Image (cartoon, rainbow, N blue to C red):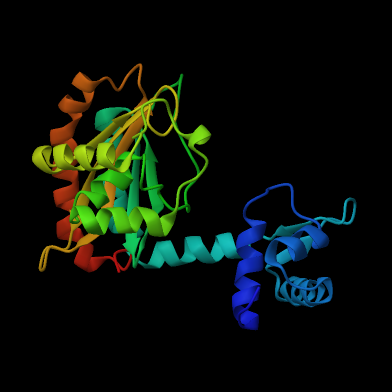
């Protein structure tokens, strides 16, 4: 692996996020394609700084809570309090999971959520990961704001995971994806049913800067298909669009939207 020391260190931290059980030093060295000795030096320094810890029982390395604390501290001071009431209200109204993704360059990352599901079947994935563009409602909403050529280039840039991980109704080709984007543009929002996972549905809409209208985020509602039928998603769409409009108006006051 080429790159500076700081690039290697951040790559190491990102690798540690992939397994909550922790990772052995040799596995990290192999994954990052750097010598074991260099891996050991970086781990020792990150431990000294408080970002990594080692389990003495199994010798696995884990992230500490320091990065999480930094993230929450940033969110608390960067406008999360402005947008959270909007998410909470939409979650309460729909009774489902509401997520906000922000656009940062060529990535869309889920950074905030509100859970409105009552006791019973819930859909509540982890925050902080990039939205897959090819088969999620959040991905389709963002792609539909682009030209077809730009959308396909963005999907290619992100790359595809194993198709075996897709839901049964995920797009089967670029042509099918582009057709879904066309319909999303006509309706003003995107939706999927059993595209990203069996038994799960979602709808999403972009959040735009109120001045120049560039896309700064994506707002979505997701939940079990048993509750989120096509008819139910159509009922929810007006509330989703209204909340996205609120977020658009609030976005200049929040550093979450960069």
Q: Residue 5 location, x and y as percent? A: 65, 82
Q: Quadrant of residue 187?
A: top left
Which residue is situated farthest in the top direction here?
A: 226
In this orientation, which residue lies closer to the viewer: 193 or 217? 193
Q: Is residue 253 visible?
A: yes
Q: Which residue occupies 26% across, 40% down?
A: 175
Query: Relative to 83, is 12 above or below?
Result: below
Please give the name of the residue rendered at 19% of the width and 29% of the height, measured from the top-left corner: 236
Between residues 221 and 29, which one lies in front from this camera angle?
A: 29
Identify the residue at image location x=14%, y=50%. 245
- Where the N terminus falls, by quadrant? bottom right
253 left or right of 16 in image: left
List x then y, in percent, for residue 143: 25, 51
Is 213 located above or below residue 39 in the figure?
above
Can residue 88 be seen here? The reply is no
Report the residue that reaches farthest toward the bottom.
4
x and y percent of residue 46 in the render? 72, 73
Image coords of residue 150 (percent x, y): 24, 59
């Amino acid at each position: 692996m080429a790159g500076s020391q700081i690039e290697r260190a951040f790559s190491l931290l990102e690798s540690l996020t992939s397994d909550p059980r922790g990772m052995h030093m040799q596995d990290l060295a192999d994954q990052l394609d750097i010598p074991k000795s260099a891996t050991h030096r970086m781990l020792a320094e990150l431990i000294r700084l408080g970002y990594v810890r080692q389990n003495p029982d199994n010798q696995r390395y884990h992230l500490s809570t320091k990065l999480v604390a930094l993230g929450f501290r940033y969110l608390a001071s960067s406008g999360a309090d402005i947008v959270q009431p909007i998410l909470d209200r939409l979650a309460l109204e729909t009774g489902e999971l509401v997520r906000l993704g922000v656009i940062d360059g060529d990535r869309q990352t889920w950074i905030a959520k509100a859970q409105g599901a009552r006791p019973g079947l819930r859909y509540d994935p982890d925050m902080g990961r990039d939205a897959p563009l090819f088969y999620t409602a959040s991905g389709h909403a963002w792609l539909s704001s682009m030209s077809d050529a730009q959308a396909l280039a963005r999907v290619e840039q992100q790359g595809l995971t194993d198709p075996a991980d897709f839901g049964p109704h995920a797009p089967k080709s670029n042509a099918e994806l582009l057709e879904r984007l066309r319909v999303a543009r006509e309706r003003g929002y995107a939706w999927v049913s059993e595209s990203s996972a069996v038994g799960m549905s979602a709808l999403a809409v972009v959040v735009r800067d109120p001045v120049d209208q560039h896309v700064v985020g994506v707002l979505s509602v997701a939940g079990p298909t048993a509750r989120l039928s096509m008819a139910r998603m159509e009922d929810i769409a007006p509330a989703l669009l209204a909340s996205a409009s609120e977020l658009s108006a609030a976005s200049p006051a929040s550093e979450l939207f960069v």
